[in-house]
């Protein structure tokens, strides 16, 4: 009788412990699956970021324009000539402020400014003449912006000529027109520098 009671107690203990052990094992398995899923998600995110960076680099490579060293030098010359125009316009603006205004000196500065504008235009024409059809197509938007800005400069120079052509020109008007030309030339310089950064010298 005592032996039967002991056996029955052992069977009951085993029966009760099996569901508990199965539940603990199932929980650990679920945790392992969750951890694995989380690791896979992080790896996919890293791969996605790497692909995004690679696509960005490919886009930059496509946007770059293959150019000769001579063409790079030419665009640099365009930038330098534009910088000279900007500096001359700024100098004219300073010389015509307030009591500093002298009509004759302003006319002389205007003549120098006109000469430098002509030089800048010639530099741009040389640049455009040296581009092939593919390069012209790639730079079409920027060259259109350059032409628009240079046309604005010509209009501003004409307004300056009109004011200085008067017997008693208004110094404030001359200063304002010179500042306008200075700002326009800065915009033009930005176009040249953007083109320069876009050009990749051919090996």
Image (cartoon, rainbow, N blue to C red):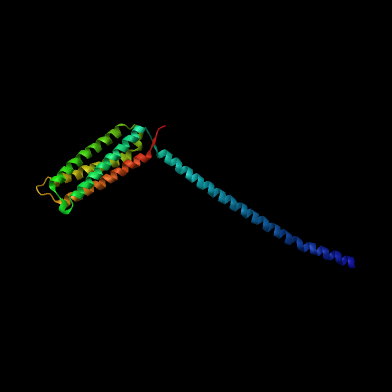
- Toward the front, the furthest residue is 100
Q: Is residue 148 visible?
A: no
From the viewer's side, name the closer residue of 188 and 139. 188
Residue at the limit of the structure toward the left, as seen here: 167
Outermost residue to the right: 1
Report the front residue among 4 and 179.
Answer: 179
* Residue 43: image location, x then y, percent: 56, 49
Residue at image location 24% in from the left, 47% down from the top:
182
How far from the left and from the top, in percent, is residue 113?
20, 42
Residue 108 position (above or below residue 35): above
Q: Is residue 11 left or right of residue 186?
A: right
Residue sitting at x 15%, y 45%: 105
* 148 displayed left or right of 5: left
**Residue at horizontal 35%, vertical 42%?**
194
- Total numbered badges shown on the rendered structure: 0
Q: Judge whether 133 appears above or below 161 on screen.
A: above
Q: Residue at x 27, y 42 (%)?
A: 83
Q: Nearer the viewer, residue 44 or 85?
A: 85
Q: Position of residue 175 (x, y in %)?
A: 19, 50
In the image, 92 versus 60, the foreground residue is: 92
User: In which image quadrant can residue 79 be found?
Assistant: top left
Residue 107 shows up from this direction: yes
Q: Is residue 61 left or right of residue 82?
A: right
Q: In the rendered image, which quarter contains the C terminus?
A: top left
The N terminus appears in which quarter of the rendering? bottom right
Q: Is residue 131 left or right of residue 18?
A: left
Where residue 45 sits: x, y (%)? Answer: 53, 49
């Amino acid at each position: 009788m005592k032996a039967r009671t002991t056996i029955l107690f052992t069977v009951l203990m085993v029966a009760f412990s099996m569901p508990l052990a199965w539940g603990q094992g199932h929980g650990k398995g679920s945790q392992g699956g969750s951890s694995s899923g989380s690791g896979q998600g992080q790896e996919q995110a890293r791969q996605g970021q790497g692909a995004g960076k690679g696509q960005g680099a490919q886009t930059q490579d496509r946007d770059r324009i293959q150019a000769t060293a001579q063409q790079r030098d030419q665009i640099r010359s365009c930038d330098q000539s534009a910088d000279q125009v900007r500096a001359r316009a700024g100098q004219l603006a300073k010389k015509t402020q307030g009591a500093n205004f002298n009509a004759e000196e302003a006319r002389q500065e205007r003549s120098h400014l006109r000469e430098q504008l002509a030089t800048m235009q010639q530099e741009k024409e040389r640049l455009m003449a040296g581009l092939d059809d593919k390069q012209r197509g790639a730079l079409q938007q920027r060259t259109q912006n350059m032409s628009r800005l240079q046309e604005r400069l010509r209009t501003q120079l004409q307004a300056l000529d009109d004011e200085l052509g008067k017997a008693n020109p208004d110094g404030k008007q001359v200063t304002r027109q010179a500042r306008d030309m200075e700002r326009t030339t800065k915009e033009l310089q930005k176009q040249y520098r953007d083109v320069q950064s876009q050009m990749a010298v051919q090996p």
